[in-house]
Image (cartoon, grey):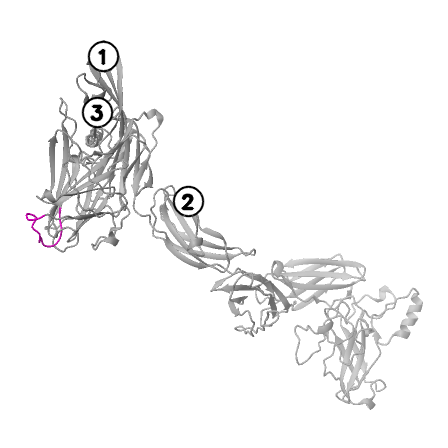
Amino acid sequence: MFLLIFLLASYNSIASSSSILVDFTSHAIQPTPQAYIIEYSPPVGYPPSGSAVEGTTFHSLINGTISATEYTVSVSAILMDGTRQNVGELAVFSSPDAPTLDSIETTEHEATISYFPPQGQNITYHIEYYPEEHKEYSNAIDTKASLVRLRGLDSGTTFRLRIRSVYQGVFSQELIDSTFVTQGTANYDYSSSAELYSVRTLPPNFNLGLQTTTEMTSYEYSKEVEEEPSITTPLVSVITTTSSPEPSFFTSTKLEQTTTNPITTETIPPSTTTSTEATTTIRITTTTTSFKPKAAPVEVNSGDLGEDHPTENSNALVDLSEMFQEYGHPSEVYLSNENEMLRLDWEAPENANCEAFFVNYTILTLSRPRSFSLATSDEHANIKMFPEHTLDIRVFCMLAGALSKTWWAHRIAHLSKPKALENARVAEVNTDEFYVASIKLMWDWPVYHDFERYKIVISYGIGRADSKEMEVTNKEEFVLLDKLEPSNQYSISVRNASTELSLTSKATQLEQVTAPIISSTVYPGQISSNSININFGDSDPEQGRFDYYLLTFSGNNKNISKKVEMEHELVKGSGYNLHSSFSRKSFTFTKLIPGKTYQFSVYTVYKGVKSRPVSADITTYPLKVNQLFPVVGKDYVVLYWDIENFADSDCRFRLSYNADNIPTVSVELKGASRHRFSGLKAEVYYTFTITVIMGIGQAAAESESEMIRRELVVGFDNDLSVFSLLNGSPDNFAIIVSDDTSLNDDNYELKSWFEVKDEDVWGAYRASPSTWNPFDSERVRRAAFTVGTDDCVKRNLDEPYCNGILRAGTDYRVKIRMYTDTKVAMETDWGRIEGAKDSDDEEEDEEDEEDDRRFPCHMYLNGCRRKAANNRLSLIPFFISILITFFLF
């Protein structure tokens, strides 16, 4: 019951402020009928639509109508015989509501007046002002603005101010009646002469902070302030009863207007006098304010007028839980901007049968919340925008001039600016291989974000004229701005915005340069166990701008970055020796760990922003196993080995064996140090090989193969018939090894093992050191040299030759060359050392073998040819170098 009384009180408060006068004198019929029936639409008013008046009455005053609305009135007559006859149809405009005073701010010669517009479209305002008690100096203006500045006022003077609303020529029944005092000292006597005043109306979007010298910086609905003792704001309610709503006639004045609308002075003719006198009640609110001289202007509170104000009520706001119980679940109220007003929209279902709507809204964020009400026949209404305030908006259905419980709508409207996003930042910039740039944005989301009411708006562009916008309507971890230009600076603005109103948070500004392009490729050059040569090509500056290259090296628990100018320079790494080539951008990193994977990356850099990396993972060659020991059984071999893994890398082993007419068998192991090969054949020479593999995927690298290997022991005498002293004294002896004696055998300067080891056919090379001379003493008559005993991990600049390992399954020849101190070289013939000769006649081969043999049996790689299998039951003792070749028993 309390809820219904509250709503009725609110409705009656607004409904009583508007009325229409229906005058159908010109449509009267003769003879006089029994009565006239008056029907009107919209059917909001009292007496209700369909009411009757006596046949001798030709007009009717309908109160409680919807303000500022066009009514259609139909008049019919009940004749004496009881029949009904249509008389006519009239279009009548209801009177508007009066505006509500917001504030009056004064200076010495000016006054700025702000008031709230009432409900309705095309409302104008009639303003009259004059010095108190001197109405003969009255000035009047008509304007559409709700913010007006009066100029040319006398200082220290009390002025009377009256403001009415006007709709289609119909004045509001109520008005603002207030007084204000200009600052300064009074210096004019109005009893002696008259003087004109000028006035300037302000446009709706007038910025008070830019146009006045007061402390107020923006125009907004002012919150209540406590008055100082010297400021008084008495509120006086004056009720005047007249025969018709007839305002005073005003005199024409000199006016100053900034809007394009012409200023006019209107007078309202007295209403037609009839035999029945209509009585109208006009409510006038008077506010008197006085200020300290020269003090800053104080906003004048229009006061909590309660039930005496037409559109404001002081009833307590009904709790929503009670509303839900009484009216059910509400519909939604939608907000939008319209001509700097707040537009409310709603949709009532057809079965609600609403003839009109009653709107009540309360400003919750005032120190004392204030409520306002209005009625409308449309499913929308415009109210004043209340920046930085929160409104409780409730819309009710009206049926037959009363409130209905069939439907209602509700909305809590927050009109303050949304909270700005925190920690907005650029998380990543990138330009892909197709030269398309992108920027990844992130920010800290609020604890609660209503995506239905608010959205994130991101504006970005190279320049303001080329700005683009995107909206974020769902919670995402990041936002990607793509399809951008590389090597350009973008201005980015991020703000939180209302999805309905033009309310936005303070923008967060970011400036970001997009990443440059890179078209270089990174590839390795020569790799060893402790060095890597890295190369990269040029990026084309014509495809995208950049300032320089950045080469990064990761490994050994440290990262090294080196700036490389587009024109190259000699560079040195910290703890590493780097060499740059001007032609191919080549860098060699030394002092590396064997078997470790290193990452090399190249960037282009523009204004401190790096491109995407072009990278290569490269592993140094691991060292071969330290020890490799075989244990030979009847039909098996067990291999044992040891490895040094300094970098603790992923380490694998590939073991294999082969023999004549037996295919190669391989196995790959991980985390092992022994392996057993079974099922081997007797009386077969096998070669076993082990290779160390470190690194993963494409970065895997293999060591040199370690084999259980045969040694080639070369023994010779200091034969003066071959090495004649007539050509000079011996300086050094060269052991020349070859798998093809037609290659390189007559070169004075012989090739080294390093030069031939990667060739398919080696040809002749020198295995002994450049200074080797076993006959440096006259007592030495015989010398021996074992071929293939050195690992040759790296080259020695002081010694170009190395006694490197031999290849398995290859027939080698050897000869001896002596270099004298007179630069003369003398050498032996090539000696065959494979131990056998191809022939179909075994007996003839045996005889030829005796004739062709130039060295003892131990000089042959596979030993002397054996006469029978039972004579070859023991291992050949001179196989200990690169391969293992042994005979199973």
Left or right: 183 as drawn, with respect to 28: left
- In this view, the residue farthest toward the top is 81
- In this view, the residue farthest toward the left is 191
Q: Nearer the viewer, residue 788 or 236?
A: 236
Q: Quadrant of residue 522?
A: bottom right
- Quadrant assignment for the N terminus: top left
**Upstream in sequence: badge 2 or badge 1:** 1
Circle 2: is it few (<14), some (14-19), or many (20+) Cα within 10 Å? some
Q: Which mark is residue 22?
A: 3
Q: Is residue 160 visible?
A: no
User: Mark 1 falls on what kind of element?
Assistant: loop
Percent x, y of residue 667:
69, 57
* Kind of residue at disc 1: Leu
Question: Which is closer to the viewer, label 2 or label 1?
Answer: 1
Percent x, y of residue 551:
54, 67
User: Mark 3 falls on what kind of element?
Assistant: strand
* Kind of residue at disc 2: Thr
Q: Is 505 above or below relative to 718? A: above
Query: Is 186 covered by the magenta stretch?
Result: yes
Residue placed under numbered mark 2 in the picture = 473
**Upstream in sequence: badge 3 or badge 2:** 3
Q: Nearer the viewer, residue 13 or 36?
A: 36
